[in-house]
Image: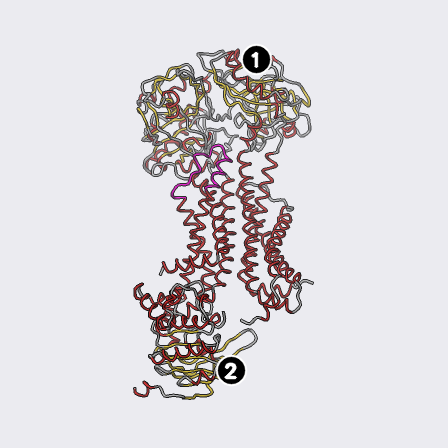
Amino acid sequence: MLKMNNIKKVFRTDLVETHALRDFSLQVEEKEFVAVTGPSGSGKTTFLNITGMLETFDGGVYELDNEDVSKLNDKQRSRLRNEKIGFIFQSFNLIPDLNLFDNVDVPLRYRGFNAKERKQRIENALERVGLSARLKHLPSQLSGGQQQRVAIARALAGDPRFLLADEPTGNLDSLMARQVMQLLEEINQQGTTIIMVTHDSELARRAHRNIHIVDGQVSDYQDLQPVLDVAEA
Amino acid sequence: MFQYYLKLSWLSIKRTPMLSALMVIAIGLGISVSITVLTVDYLMSKDPLPGKSHKLFHVQLDTYNKGNTDSAPGGLPYQLTYQDLMNLSRSEIPSKQSRSLRSGFSVIPEKVGLTPFSRSARVIDNDFFEMFKVPFLFGSPWEDEVNNKAKKVVVIAKRLNDKLFDGENSVGKTINLDKQLFTIVGVIDTWEPTPRFYDVNNGAFSDTEQLFIPFSLIPVLELPSWGSNNAWKSEVFESYEDKLRSETMWLQYWVQLDTKAKQEEYREFLAGYVEQQRPLGRFEKEDAKTDIKDVVQWMENNRVVSDDNSVLVGLSFMFLAVCMLNTIALLLAKYLKRAPEVGVRRALGASKLEIFTQHIVDVGLIGLAGGALGLLLGQLGLLGVKSLYANYERLVNMDLTLIATAIGLAIGASIIAGLYPAWLICRTNPSIYLKTQ
Amino acid sequence: MLEIKPILSALLRHKSSTLLIVLQIALTLAVVVNAVYIISERLSLIDSKSGLPESEIFTLGMNAFGENPDLKYDIQADQELIRNMPGVVDAVVINATPLGRGGDNSSVAGTKEDYDNGNNVNVAFYRGDSHMLNSFGINLISGRNFTEEEIIYNRGYVDPKVAIITETVAKRLYPDGNALGSKIYFNNYEVTIIGIVDYAVSPWVHHPNHDMAIFNPLVHLDAFHRVLVRTEKGALKEVMGQIEEKLLERNPDRVVFAARTMAENRELSYQGDVAMSKILTVVIALLVTITALGIVGIVSFNISQRTKQIGTRRALGASKADIQRYFVTETIILTTLGLVIGTILAVTFNMHLVDSYQLPPIQWHYIPVGMITMLVTGILAVWVPAKRASSVSPAVATQSI
């Protein structure tokens, strides 16, 4: 469970102060699929970065699985991120000189798994996204859609509870975008909570819930589908 | 994790071959210059007799009259007069002692095909060999009694033995020196201390003598000095005896004093000796000083390490500093280029410490390569130095300590150079690199 | 029109790389200026004249053995033999030779009071017979040479009555010019100056009074002695090749060794200075190369970071030359800054050298020369990357990420 209460985030330069998030509150339940929409500069990405603990915030409380994130040091936050959160980016962000195997290996290395376990997990993750035959390929040898699938495999390899996606289909043509979206839905059905920032309202409609951010605040909730397991729990 | 970092480092070197090569060259050049200069400096100043050098002392007396002071550092002359040497050597305080003079002979070989040649000789007491740990190949030093009762015996060096006797055991045979027959009692193995610490004021980098003759032969054979002679008093020498009685300083004296107590006792003995000599009209200065200096102090006092060398050591470290500044700049460039990857790694759960460590390992690997290159270039540098100085052949060879120093210096300096770039990269905000590529 | 303001603000935004390059240039200047200065000092030392016609002179050592050799007879016979050899101008048996690195020296003064008060000067002594001056190839300015009667042959040392001195000694002891006929004191000796020669140097090139010498008419009857031979032009090699054989033919009971031309003596005397100059030259070359490579590396990096900016400038109408000028100006600013700091470092470093190693303080003109050299190096180093920067296509500006 993810809970934000009155989160504030201010960017300062010498001349201007930008309030990226102001009194931002949100709760995301287990196994939800949340789409976050909003205009450029509304604070979507800042929200996602704070959620993933890549950025600090200036006020409010953020609890991840009942743990107050602001009280953790860098090492603990990194550990938490490594164990519980997977990231997917618009531009895939695969490391260009690592082959697929080694790319998926990255989060597992920081987890400290032994070689056998890592190999097992990498193979499973790549199989899940349908790319198990290309372990030794470099990212540049793949199409955009394939690269994003590798990125998803990398995000999933450590069995995170949350998957944070920032415009995951933004750089893909519509056919590939559909495939990736399908993959995300499957993953969600298998139990991973997904928070996805997107421009695409059609994609957003396929999520359980839509959050619209304007000027750093949640302006609108829209429950599209009930979350099955939560309803039962 | 260390292996993983090494692997990443290797990948990054492969990705930026130019930048990496520039860094390795910068570090390599810095190390090679430093290690070349340090090698010469270290070998010149290192303790030639570890564990023993602090027990061996060179004796100094200020025998000058009031108007004169020696130009040597500290104002004390390097050498002693014959009369002082004879008087001091009666002391029982030193456990071992050796008077010493650099002289020389014409060697007249019996072997067919050899013409007479001259060789310098070290004129000493028999304790000399044990005090300075001179290794014997055949035979041994002469008997104790020869120190006082002159006898024409000689210890020769291996090189001379090879030349005259084809390397066979020549103990018991005779050798013709200045038309006098000397009996060989010993042959020493190769012994070429560099610097020649037992006589640094007559050429610290000269060759070791090949003939060793009893000091007691000096008045008998009227041996000439092949080293320096310092005279301040106007004395007319009609004969060799005049020189022996004079104030000319031309001899050296080493004593072994095993304990602090013995050393104190000997200092007092020297002070007492000065007082005892005053009634004879000697030691005019009211504060006539005496001193004993151990081997290392003696080398320092005689400036075995030249000023040029010290200047070069300073310069070489400034050179290394420039190379390291260069490396820091290149590292900054390389790491900023890699910032997006670091952003991804952070997002995937790497802590700042892990990123920092990864980059320090990276720098360390480059440093290691730079150190290896530095050692290779350093060997070239030493070859160059050898070709510039006539007497440096034996001096400029790297030993294990120096090789370890070079590698340690390279890795250490690189890691210090890498601290700032690695710190900078580990604390940059990852999120700004994730949005775009 | 130089765009100094935007360049400065860009530099301030990249503080660490700016600082690094400035420091690097500063240190390089400090080292180069001082090293060049040391080299030039050494080179002028190596070139210093000896006053001898060096190409006509060689020296050798001789060690006599045999039971009670008649050394006086031997020395006179040897001198006569060598002097009569074809190709030989003159020769002398002598205690020491110029640039020979071994010999005798003593402190002397013009009066006994000066001597006793320590107001004295340390000078090298040459001892031999009346052929010393002719063998050295030096000339009397005033006074006369030694007569045969004045020559003392002695084993050991006997106080001589007369001396010939170099003009340098005369000027030092008798600044008023009345040295001839005056006395030289050292300790209890008193010697009359009978002649003054134009120039001679000591055996030790690093002696503080290397350009001073005193000649005494004294021949040491030692088993070991040195010989200095002056030959006719071009005859040196031939005489040197025969001399050992001739000497041993006359009397085989000695060893002739260390026959060296003056050129060889000079090389041995200045070995350390030559070595120091060469080592420093290598260090300077490497250092300037490293710094130039550093500038290339940093500017290249800056350019790769600013590709889009450069493209934008090009799109907005900047010419290729404008872009090149931007980066060259940037480097000139950085280098100048480094040179200002470097000058302070160079002077500080030099003061340390003067304090610790008794080097003379640096002459000011080395600094501007060093600065110009570094500036030229900087501009040359920036040329290639700046050229590349100017070839960035304006289209880069419009490419999206």
Image disc number at residue A39? 2
The residue type indicated by label 1 comes to Leu
Magenta-tinted stretch: B379-402
Image disc number at residue B282? none
Q: What residue is at 34 percent from the left and 68 percent from the top?
A: A123
Q: Is residue A88 above or below residue B125?
A: below
In the image, C355 versus B244, the foreground residue is C355
- Would residue A2 be found to the left or right of residue C193 on screen? left
Chain of the residue under label 1? C
In the image, B303 versus A175, the foreground residue is A175
For the N terminus of chain B, the quadrant is: bottom left
Q: Is residue C276 above or below residue C304?
A: above
Labels 2 and 1 touching (C-beta < 8 A)? no
Same chain for marks 2 and 1? no
In the image, C216 versus B317, the foreground residue is B317
Q: How is the image coloured?
A: secondary structure
Structural distance between the alpha carbons of marks 2 and 1: 112 Å
Q: Where is residue A196 shown, x and y percent of the image? A: 43, 79
Residue C107 visible to the viewer: no
Which callout, 2 or 1, points to the residue nearer the camera?
2
Q: Is residue C167 above or below residue A30?
A: above
Q: Where is residue C94 shown, x and y percent of the image? A: 55, 20
Q: Secondary structure at mark 2?
A: loop
The residue type indicated by label 2 comes to Pro
On whether residue B400 falls in the magenta region, the answer is yes
Residue A31 visible to the viewer: yes
In the picture of the structure, the residue carrying the numbered disc 1 is C81
Graded by Cα atoms within 10 Å as few (under 14), some (14 to 19) or many (20 or more), the crowding at tag 1 reads some
